[in-house]
Amino acid sequence: MEIDHLYTDSVSLLKQLIETPSLSGKEEKAAEKIRQHLQKYNVQYQTLKNNTWSTNKHWRPDLPVILLNSHIDTVKPVDGWVYDPFKASCEGEKLIGLGSNDAGAPLVSLMAVFLYFYSKNDLPFNLIYAATAEEESSGKNGMESLVKVLDRVDFAIVGEPTQMELAVAEKGLMVLDCAVHGKAGHAARNEGVNSIYLAIDEIQKIKNYQFSRVSDLLGEVKMTVTQIDAGFQHNVVPDICKFVVDVRTNECYTNHEIIDEILALLNCDVKARSRRLNSSGINLDHPFVQKVKNMGIRCYGSPTLSDQSLMNFRSVKMGPGDSARSHTANEFIYLHEIRSGIERYIQLLDGLILE
């Protein structure tokens, strides 16, 4: 299939997706656009809620399986949009609209790559293309539900805007709800135990603590207190102080190991909202990574979270666009980034041998 045709069709699909609101958790219409595009090429697909996936035509069970994945949902438009976020606006090479960069361009580029390889009968691997939901909200009805029904995946390319550089590791996330208990009393008298003062001690521990395992790619595990709440009246010593900790993990730890270390550190109630968003990393000797490095493409560790955190198989993150444009007003993608993204993906997959 000609790359020129796939590129033109990819841009057309992206424009349709921009003009189809798909806020995280409400992606039904965007999922339908993906399915219509696959039908246009006579490609069969499977569905699970708002997730859609297809396999290459000449599937062989003895071959390794590569997953090409990106997400169809977007965040809500922020303040400051000059353009209509739900209209595909073009200014020369610039295509403007909500989700154009994150992750519309990677999504349609990977679709084009899948269609390019779809009918080839001599591939050294099998391909799955998956357009998934609820990435922006880390929802349970997106990738988390899909990985439970996929029979096997040996390696995944997750489409996110990385300027077509390769993220070989990314930080995980845990959000902790903490509570320190004191004793209520009258502020005018020497009564009670002030929970705010107790919380200061715990917060100081968090500020000063350093986890011993430091990643060459992602650096240290980082803990940041981001919210605090205590007291209801100026003359009452508060008996409880609550605070929230944002924890960004590296690939040297599992989230379970991190929480165990934090529980040993703090003298207060600690509850993790979730332990499922783990850091991810891949061996730099992996054949895909080696091919990337041989082509002179930069490899790096990413501070941002993606659906990689929900994958129980080896994965990397790579795609057209720039992460700095994500979640910003007047989000855009350059059209040449889509074309070069398609070409680069194809170069990297063509003849790839997974050991």
Image (spheres, rainbow, N blue to C red):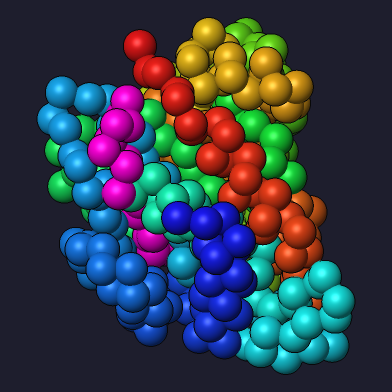
Q: Is residue 235 left or right of residue 258?
A: right
Looking at the image, which residue is at 30% across and 49% down? 119
Above-or-below relation of 153 to 218: below
Above-or-below relation of 146 to 285: below
* Depth check, front residue: 91 or 260: 91
Above-or-below relation of 322 to 330: above
Q: Is residue 266 left or right of residue 322?
A: left
Whole-percent x, y for residue 255 in the image = 43, 28
Q: Is residue 31 left or right of residue 189?
A: left
- Residue 130 is inside the magenta segment: yes
The stretch of residues the image draws in magenta is 119-138
Q: Looking at the rendering, which quadrant does residue 62 occupy?
A: top left
Quarter of the picture holding the N terminus: bottom left
Above-or-below relation of 103 to 78: above
* Depth check, front residue: 47 or 278: 47
Whole-percent x, y for residue 155 in the image = 38, 29
* Depth check, front residue: 90 or 47: 90
Q: Can see residue 110? A: yes
Whole-percent x, y for residue 129 in the image = 35, 51
Quarter of the picture holding the C terminus: top left
What secondary structure do most residues of the magenta stretch adopt? loop
Looking at the image, which residue is at 82% across and 70% down? 93
Whole-percent x, y for residue 4 in the image = 60, 61
Looking at the image, which residue is at 58% across and 14% down? 290
* Depth check, front residue: 97 or 186: 97
- Count the marks: 0
Q: Is residue 51 left or right of residue 202?
A: left
Looking at the image, which residue is at 69% across and 78% down? 97
Q: Looking at the rendering, which quadrant does residue 103 occupy?
A: bottom right
